[in-house]
Amino acid sequence: MAALAAVALVVLGTLLIGVRGVAALRTTSDFLVASRRVSPLLNSAAVSGEYLSAASFLGVAGLFVKDGVGALWYPVGFTAGYVAMLVLVAAPMRRTGALTVPDFAEARLASPALRRITAVVVLVIGGLYAVPQFSAAGQVLAAVTTWPYWAGVVIAGAAVSVTLALGGMRAATYVQAFQFGLKLLLFIVPAVWLVAQAGPEVRTAALHPVEFTRFAADTPVSFQTDAVLLVDEPTPVHRPDGTADVLTSGRHAVAAGTVLVFPEGAAVPETGGGPPPGGDDWARPLLDPNDTGHPVLGTWAVLIATALGTMGLPHVLMRFHTSPDGRAARRTAAITVALLGVFYLFPGVYGALGRVLVPELYLSGATDTVVVALPSRVDPGWGGTVMTSLLTMGAFAAFLATSLGLLLVMSGAIAHDLLPGGLRGLRITVVPVAAVTVLLALQAAAIDAGTLVTWGFTVAASTFCPLLVLGIWWPRLTTAGAITGVLTGLLASCGAIAVALFGPPVDGVWGLLVTRPAPWSVPLAFAATAAVSLCGRPAPWSRAALLRLHLDEDTRARGTGRRPG
């Protein structure tokens, strides 16, 4: 009941703060970029609130339990991406005067075709990133209450669509800035409480991992998705209704919704999805997704996707267009790096404690819920209930803040870039976009939030990163080269994702390059863009368009006799 009250407070607060943007919502610029009047401090808080998604609040700790210590490379890549954005992208993007990434593409290369292609890419990236936000909302609500998975998905979708339809970017800015502060507070306080409450034995075990091979006590495991258990020795289990059974040696399929209680001392089955928590491979400070045997390449694959993908995330790039000028955009990026650095000190705390206190989540496929599962394991009384409620509130704040930005850019891609419909069209489009995302999320419960988000980063790194970096810094870029590069990156990354989802299983290094295609899809996109551009000539006016990106607003204003901005 307390967790439901926490969710209700976050949703109600989101709606009330969103109403503040209604009065100032008169034009398309108001809806998409808040009339470019957002200060660096407020904007950096909003960017951080938007960026700290389900993958950050829940996914990193869940991946720590599932894949090991190497999962901490994810926050390294997330934060490093903002350093690259600060140096290469932030100020020039703002100086274009664009409202969206497709606006930038057309302003730089005067190509309506490129504008439409980039709008489609926005929808792909937004979908891959927004679906896990709603999916995680359903998983968290199901984990802390008796409500079904779909209820959390629908609640998140309804709250986001109503807030955006009412107040647009201005409402999103206030909500995201508020929710960043809320998330930071509600992530740090329970982490400190957990460390203090867990006791010296648990803290020692968290710092000195031992492989999870035997259940330390009678342990119920609730399978939220279909699973296959690999049993090495006959293992007795029983169900909550008292029915006893024995899992014989071999493979056993377990249906979603099944609850099995493993007795104290029983051997822990394998899942085939990664190393058991605490083992030597698990404790290695490198990433080996799906246990392919190539940890160095796996680590680089995640770093390339997250660091370069950050520069291409359309909902983050749109945030810099809300700044008054290029200097403010650069200051926003710098402050954001500091804010993210503080937040990312703590996912490892939850992951390390989760390996000791709730390692069975590795079996059930519910590692994304480790953050909200910990307090009740440490303190089954009122203290655990309070902390679970606070973390649930913070988790929902993460889902809603990120979803606001994603639905905003997807609606903009449809109603501003593909089918221009003005302010009314933008407000109306939010609802069907949210509805489609909810429908997709209802089918995505079996996929880790971190995996889906990483795929979103991979598509962004393979499409928008080459377009932006070369479009801002390379005078030889041509329209044909830009279109070729974007399409090459889109087809390469999405093709690999489709094979990973629907194709036959692929093992070894090829399996890694299919599930994590950034190491080859990003260089391929850069190479295709450069090769085609070198075969042609940029338009005569392109140098002036490029120069505009690098001239400070004050310099340009003095040259034209106009006021800056």
Image (cartoon, helix red, strand yellow):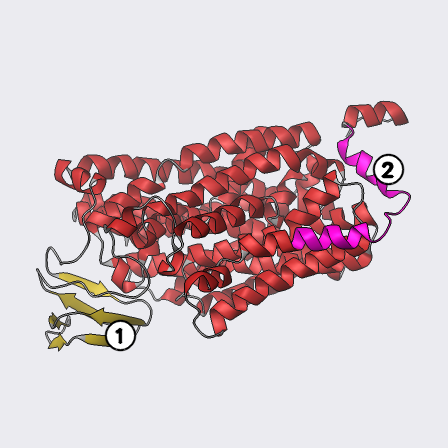
- Say whether residue 255 is magenta: no
Disc 1 residue type? Val
Q: Position of residue 98 (x, y in %)?
A: 75, 44
Look at the image and give the residue range highlighted in magenta: 525-551
Tell me the residue at 54%/65% (across/down): 496
Q: Classify residue 372 as left or right of residue 317.
A: left
Residue 56's place in the image compared with 134, above or below, is above
- Say whether residue 536 is magenta: yes
| Label 2 CA crowd tier, 10 Å (few <14, some 14–19, many 20+) | few
Q: Position of residue 272 (x, y in %)?
A: 30, 66
Q: Position of residue 440 (x, y in %)?
A: 50, 67
Q: Quadrant of the C terminus?
A: top right
Q: Which corner quadrant of the image does residue 365 belong to? A: bottom left
Q: Classify residue 455 as left or right of residue 99.
A: left
Which disc, if any, is residue 544?
2
Outermost residue on the right side: it is 540
3D distance between C-alphas at marks 2 and 1: 62 Å
Magenta-drawn stretch, dominant element (helix, strand or loop): helix
Tell me the residue at 80%/50% (across/down): 534
SS under mark 2: helix
Which disc, if any, is residue 254?
1
Q: Position of residue 329 (x, y in %)?
A: 65, 32
Asked whether 369 or 503 is in front, the reply is 503
Q: State whether residue 114 appears in this view.
A: yes
Which disc, if any, is residue 97?
none
Disc 2 residue type? Ala
| Label 1 CA crowd tier, 10 Å (few <14, some 14–19, many 20+) | some
Q: Earlier in the sequence, mark 2 or mark 1?
A: 1
SS under mark 1: strand
Q: State whether residue 423 appears in this view.
A: no
